[in-house]
Amino acid sequence: MNTWRNASLAVTAAAVLALTTACGQDNGSGTPNGQAVGAANPAGQPADAGYGAGGGYGAGADAGEAAVKPAGQLAVRKSGDLGEVLTDSAGFTLYRFDKDTANPPKSNCEGDCAKAWPVVSAEGAAAPPGVDASLMGEVTRADGTKQLTIDGWPMYRYAKDTKAGDVNGQGVGGTWFASAPDGKKAEAGAGGAGEDGGDGGDAVAGGGGGDEKAPADLAGLSVRKDPKLGEIVVDKNGMTVYGFTKDSPWPMKTACTDDCLKKWPVVAPVDGDDMEGITVSKRGNVTFNRPDGIKQQTIDCRPLYTFAGDTKAGDTNGQGVGGSWYAVAPDGKLVGAPE
């Protein structure tokens, strides 16, 4: 296995996309010229993000293997009673195959197998915070593709995982398993007592003191007292919410598109009665119907994001990244951002 070098986190600011109507209009929708916009996407990705049936990974693929997609900034998430599992930058579970070998690394999934289990490219992959980067490597497949390995095990996605957090590939054929952060198999019971084990959903570890609410009890948006940053906004899972200095709240525009959204998923729309401690501004905490078709929550018209590098509730690893990303205060201001 060739040791994978650390890849630096790069946030790509694409061309600025603008609404033709200003935030805070009477209808409160923020929809440009009444364009039709699809349902909110919790993974922060367009409907055809390449991980579901629309991406050529399912039974409808024409010929050959599914397109190889990079993993980007890897992350670790708690998934039911499987415990910690490895995901790509968009939150899709990574899997390993018992019929592969780790020493030496070798993939035995080709042809139709690789349609159902798309390989993960090693290009641009970066280790999750707190995970030993030396575990990452690559193996050259028969077609020349460089496939990501974790502790020697080749990594795959599953065609039937259609949204972030799905673990539909777990245990398939008795040979496919979600990968733990160290490359070992994630198996039932690894989550331990007290975690959500019934439906394959996420159980996010709590952060901070023992008097904080469990994530299951949190509103869609609420406020947490961080020991360093003060009062900051968190989502329903207790994950820190961020703003991007290159966005514009008024008129509402976004400079985070495409690859940027893989590292900084948007916060999906939240009902006004599902917010606690958030300041209600004159301009309003409206839904931003982005020109790329994704619906995004705002505070005081500032678009909101989470960070793929935050792996548990209370993490603030995105604070100050690139001198452009900062936690959001209850009034929509960016905590610690230069004036």
Image (cartoon, rainbow, N blue to C red):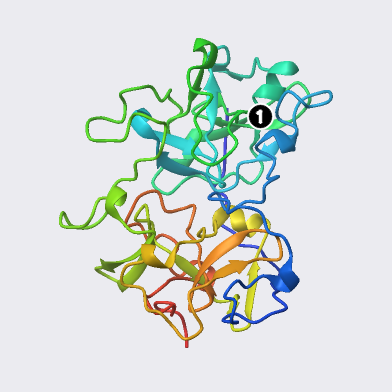
Q: Residue furthest right?
A: 63
Instruction: Indicate the secondary structure of the residue bearing disc 1.
Output: loop
Instruction: Using the image, determine if residue 106 lies above or below residue 158.
Output: above
Instruction: Using the image, determine if residue 327 lies above or below residue 111.
Output: below
Q: Badge 1: few (under 14), some or many (20 or more) residues near its Cα, within 10 Å?
A: many
Instruction: Compare residues 35 and 18 and report the one nearer the observer.
Output: 35
Instruction: Compare residues 1 and 158 and report the one nearer the observer.
Output: 158
Question: Residue 109: x, y in percent?
Answer: 66, 17
Say if residue 229 shows up in the picture.
no
Image side of residue 240 versus residue 75, left or right: left
Instruction: Using the image, determine if residue 91 lies above or below residue 323.
Output: above
Question: Residue 98: x, y in percent?
Answer: 52, 14
Image side of residue 239 versus residue 42, left or right: left
Question: Residue 4: x, y in percent?
Answer: 57, 39
Say if residue 90 shows up in the picture.
yes
Instruction: Compare residues 335 and 290 and report the one nearer the observer.
Output: 290
Q: Amino acid at mark 1?
A: Val
Query: Which residue is painted at 37% across and 78% down in the image?
Result: 279
**Residue linked to disc 1:** 119
Q: Where does the N terminus fall, quadrant-wise?
A: top right
Query: Which residue is painted at 49% across and 52% down in the image?
Result: 308
Q: Residue furthest left?
A: 211
Question: Residue 127: x, y in percent?
Answer: 50, 44
Instruction: Compare residues 138 and 251 and report the one nearer the observer.
Output: 251
Q: Quadrant of residue 200?
A: top left
Total marks drawn? Answer: 1
Q: Quadrant of residue 173?
A: top right
